[in-house]
Image (spheres, coloured by chain):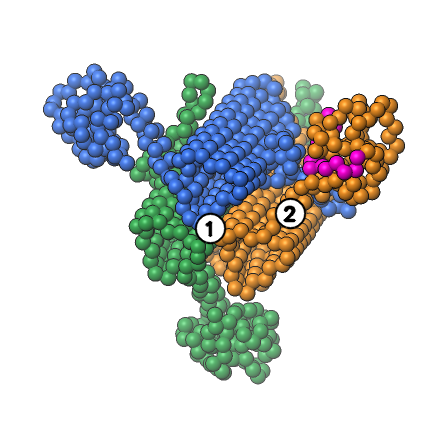
Chain colours: A green, B blue, C orange
Amino acid sequence: MEFSVAQIAALLDGTIEGNEEILISGLGKIEEATPEQLSFLANPKYEQYIYSTKAGAVMVSNNFIPENSVTTTLIRVEDPYASFTALLEEYHKAVTFSKSGIEEPSYIGENSNIGNDIYRGAFSYIGKNVSIGDNVKIYPNAYIGDNCRIGDNTLIYAGAKLYEGTIVGNGCTIHSGAVLGSDGFGFAPQEDSTYKAIPQMGHVILEDNVSIGANTVVDCATFAGSATKIGKGTKLDNLVQIAHNVTIGKNTVMAAQAGISGSTEIGDNCVFGGQSATVGHIKVANKTTLAAKSGIPKSIKKEGQVLFGYIAFDIKKFLNSYAIFKSLPDMNQRLRELEKKS
Amino acid sequence: MEFSVAQIAALLDGTIEGNEEILISGLGKIEEATPEQLSFLANPKYEQYIYSTKAGAVMVSNNFIPENSVTTTLIRVEDPYASFTALLEEYHKAVTFSKSGIEEPSYIGENSNIGNDIYRGAFSYIGKNVSIGDNVKIYPNAYIGDNCRIGDNTLIYAGAKLYEGTIVGNGCTIHSGAVLGSDGFGFAPQEDSTYKAIPQMGHVILEDNVSIGANTVVDCATFAGSATKIGKGTKLDNLVQIAHNVTIGKNTVMAAQAGISGSTEIGDNCVFGGQSATVGHIKVANKTTLAAKSGIPKSIKKEGQVLFGYIAFDIKKFLNSYAIFKSLPDMNQRLRELEKKS
Amino acid sequence: MEFSVAQIAALLDGTIEGNEEILISGLGKIEEATPEQLSFLANPKYEQYIYSTKAGAVMVSNNFIPENSVTTTLIRVEDPYASFTALLEEYHKAVTFSKSGIEEPSYIGENSNIGNDIYRGAFSYIGKNVSIGDNVKIYPNAYIGDNCRIGDNTLIYAGAKLYEGTIVGNGCTIHSGAVLGSDGFGFAPQEDSTYKAIPQMGHVILEDNVSIGANTVVDCATFAGSATKIGKGTKLDNLVQIAHNVTIGKNTVMAAQAGISGSTEIGDNCVFGGQSATVGHIKVANKTTLAAKSGIPKSIKKEGQVLFGYIAFDIKKFLNSYAIFKSLPDMNQRLRELEKKS
């Protein structure tokens, strides 16, 4: 993709000093940028490079007064760094959503409705009675089972799998190998010590702007009509396990390999570290932070706590206890000496 | 799928009071059910709803005597709740096994034999010399390598992958993204500090009625002709790791993200919590329960123990130790005071 | 595959006593081998079997002097066990790389260059501008995004997924379900308590002879042009998480379910146990050994340490502390008794 300096300046509400017809196809650091790239000058420490940069154009502050002669084209904006990150995001979005059309062979079942600006990669599968919104990108080898519903502007990467009846909102991202809607782990012990599967007939709902990491699994709910639900804006990293009947609130983030046991409710704006976990059937209050590798054993009612530990409690207390744990042999020795004296 | 009240009553050995021709297509709670749904009345607390329910039919006990007039059709059975769960299971089974036929394109190699009532989803792959029983459902994008053998009534969900030579019994369920038969992690350190792969030439055996969760991995055994084996009726949750040469007994359940290291033998009827693990080359006795996040460091010889801890030991003792761990700073303070006095 | 005894002897620089035309199609233990199999005698304890073995041929030491009559064909070599493992490796390599040709349907985008002796399984996907070397085996349902580069002699198993721009060296093995290049978990908190995705525009590099386990995930780097990098000869087991901007040195091995947080640098020749982890933005020195389930909380500067623990420290010290942790209730009791006396 190429944009002229004029187009970029218009997008950023900036003014141009120099050649407005230069074509830009990428972004780069001011000291490394090539003639096809756009850069920016925000930190005065880098001012020296503006006089020698090879960038096709550089965004500078409206207030910037060059001390030497400048050969690159300038785009004057209010906040060059903010403009740069905004461009970066626009560019990334353009790249990410650039795929379109249908690669063959791909499969679509009967009674399925697909919106506009769709990409359906080769070997992608869409079942029966599926509804998909606009600007959805379904990469190769992805699987979308019967009766799924997917909103607009959602990305489904290669080999992601949505079981029958999964509902995905707008603006979601589902990374490769993620599985939504597999059976919850529910088995009833029988008298002969075998286990009988408890039918798992519910589904999974992702609200808008949810991100699901690579190879993460979200199980379906147990009962028909009910859902394991991931709230709006929540982000799950890779290899996370979300068990059946769990609900996670809005804008909660969970790092890789975290695991939430069945029927637990996680609040809004929580932060879970890598390899952390909770037991099942509890409620975790809003704004709870759980450190990496920690486990929550019972409901957390007070909001805003920071917890740590194998069986998690207040992080400061945990660290104090752990510091003494490290010197337990020394403590034991001190105790022995007192015993001798007594 | 629709069934008449007459068909359902025949299946349950029940007697009908009302219209036996009503068609039922689902199950619902008595207070919410619609005319196409069947419900049940087991708990007397809900009796009020039998007089106003919109359900097409309701299962009641043979002993039930209505106090008011009933407009819905009744199916009288011995135990309405047991009949309801039996129907739920039958219904779920019917739904789960409802797919059939071959969607194109799909791939099958030479000399492979496939039974009756098969579903082969689009983009599913069956290699050479594969043998598959009756009523097996292979969902889209699943991969079954050469020389695999699969029994009857087994479900292989979208994108599951079976390496060459994997053997799967009857009545198994393999969820999306599960991998059976990948190379064991065996590398011999060389003098130049590189590692050389030790050929992993064995395979994986799942006995009957095994369930494998989404994105779970079971590695193949090291030696040709030998197998990593999962015993009859054992259930593994999502994202579980089973290393090479492991054997797991019958009717053992392992929750999500558990990991069993190489060449370990797990007994029958064990229960492993989420994120639990064992070291390699040990034996774990039957009926061992390992709490979540715990690790077994050596063979467990006594049956029926409940273990907990980072390096696991008896759960009661662990919880006692952990309770004191939480107050270690206080204990340290008490010790200091005694030291001052002495 | 079949080889004559003459071919095998030539490969091993051995001399034949007996029928050099016998065809061998496998390897077996001397006491169990069949006439189509080759065996070996290295340990004198097994000498008895050489007189009764049914093996088609047996490798023996140049020095071996039979005490009774031998009916099997002998191949005399310097070190029978070394010859056997060498053959095992050759055989395994031959089997592993035996697939070739193109199964249809498979997909390849424009401007992609593919070397010789390639296998492209059915439903495998190769995007645009991809470059693939010689003797690369791409199994069914694997996905290789646009602009990827793959060296020679690399195995990509069924359903592995390489995002756009991934670079893979020579002699690598990527197991089923592995994901390379998914977005790093980078989200900037906003004032309204939502999160905004930070564009992840880098890629992943695997150097030569890297092995990636089944369902393992390696995220792409954040910045365009930079990479999450796995060094030459490093081996990652199954279900491992490598976050964005991580670099791992050469000949490091990580067992299953280990997790490395973002921007951390792991040295050469490290050994990480199963379910172990590190925090982000640290450096871990060469030859660090981290025990299973342990977590590294800060940079490790001294090489060659062996660490253990929830927050890891020296393994001997950890085990000493843990031993006392197990008897904390007893220690508390002793303290109480001293308090009573004082």
Cα distance in 3D space between marks 2 and 1: 24 Å
Question: Left of B109 or right of it: where is A163?
Answer: left
Q: C308 and A7: which one is in front? A: A7
Magenta span: C19-31
- Label 2, residues with CA under 10 Å away: few <14, some 14-19, many ≥20: some
Quick check: A11 left or right of A338? Answer: left
| Residue A189 pos. (x, y %) | 43, 23
Query: Which quadrant of the figure has residue C151?
Result: bottom right
A244, C59: nearer the viewer: C59
The quadrant in which residue C235 appears is top right
**Three-letter code, disc 2:** Phe
Q: Is residue C305 above or below residue A60?
A: above
Q: Are marks 2 and 1 on the same chain?
A: no
Q: Amino acid at mark 1?
A: Asn
Q: Main secondary structure of the magenta part?
A: loop
Image location of residue B18, percent across then percent down: 15, 25
Q: Relative to residue A65, is residue C86 drawn left or right?
A: right
Tag 1's secondary structure? loop
Query: Subunit of mark 2?
Result: C
Q: Who's the residue at 42% across and 18% down the image? A: A191
Residue A60 marker:
none
Residue B309 at x, y = what percent?
56, 29
Q: Which residue is mark 1?
A: A141
Residue shown at 73%/27% (left/top)?
Answer: C54
Residue C97: mark: 2
- Pointer 1 chain: A
In the image, residue A119 sits, relative to residue A19, either above or below, namely above
Give the structural element (helix, strand or loop) at label 2: loop
From the viewer's perspective, is the residue at label 2 or at label 1 nearer?
Answer: 2
- Residue B54 is situated, as x and y percent measured from the top left of the image, at 17, 33
